[in-house]
Amino acid sequence: MYDTEFRSRALGLVAAGMSLNAISDELGVSRAALRRWRDDPRGSSGGARPCPAPFTSTPAYAALFGYYLGDGCISRAARYHALRIACDAKLPAILADVASVVRAVHPDRPTHLVPAPGCISVQSNWKHWPCLFPQHGPGRKHERTLTMTSWQRAIVEEHPADFLRGLFHSDGSLVKNWATRMVAGERKRYEYPRWQFVNESHDIMRWCRETLDLVGVEYRQTNPRVLSVSRRADVARLTELIGIKQ
Ligand SMILES: [Zn+2]
């Protein structure tokens, strides 16, 4: 296997007009390989495209990571892995967001919308999905210990709002609570919205807390699987960062 840099050096010499024979002698690579690279510089037909992990730090990856941890799964097919993110069919804006971040991370192949009862799965097939989400493994996410790679952590730290959008728009919700209060002898009813995040995995819950810390949003761990953001200023800040769920 030759790395990308080596290949682009060879292609540079081809572009400069050097003969394949001369390049073959110079770099010690066969003329057949040079011809293949010349005719298919991106390596799309030869399957020689290098693994994309560690992935470039992009907002789309950060969001997709959150969606994957929330409602995503990876399953193995014969020649690829299928990434599926289950989306609520009644929330078209989130469905569109998921489809767009999947496309941004893996633009070379089509993104499919697969209907299922009550939900629509966004599906993308790629052999590298387990490399991009090494949290993939047998069994359910909350039944095993998950670790974040250093490159994933760097991406989350660079794009915390996008990561939180993925987490909260899959396993979170904006709940409307109400309370009454006596004002000048009259009982008045107040509505106050509150963000809630529900996840069975201690690791995902911890990553959610750490990321909220990064953006300065306060929260309360109501119980091990439920976290809530209820102070008015924090609700407003989080909503501004991730948008409402629709
Ligand atoms: Zn890979």
Image: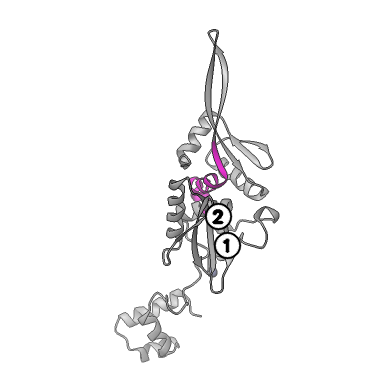
The vertical placement of 2 against 192, above or below, is below
Picture quarter containing residue 130? bottom right
Contact, CB < 8 Å: mark 2 with mark 1? yes
Amino acid type at mark 2: Tyr
Identify the residue under disc 2.
Answer: 68
Residue 77 drawn at (x, y percent): 56, 70
Identify the residue under disc 1.
Answer: 74
What residue lies at 66% left-to-right and 47% top-to-bottom?
A: 200
What residue lies at 33% left-to-right and 82% top-to-bottom?
A: 14
Picture quarter containing residue 40? bottom left
Quarter of image, ligand 1: bottom right
Dominant secondary structure, magenta:
helix
Between 98 and 117, the residue placed more toward the observer is 117
Relative horizontal placement of residue 13, taking residue 46 as reference (left or right): left
Most extreme residue toward the top, as rendered?
185
The magenta region covers: 154-174
Between 132 and 192, the residue placed more toward the observer is 192
Answer with mark 2 or mark 1, whichever residue precedes in sequence: 2
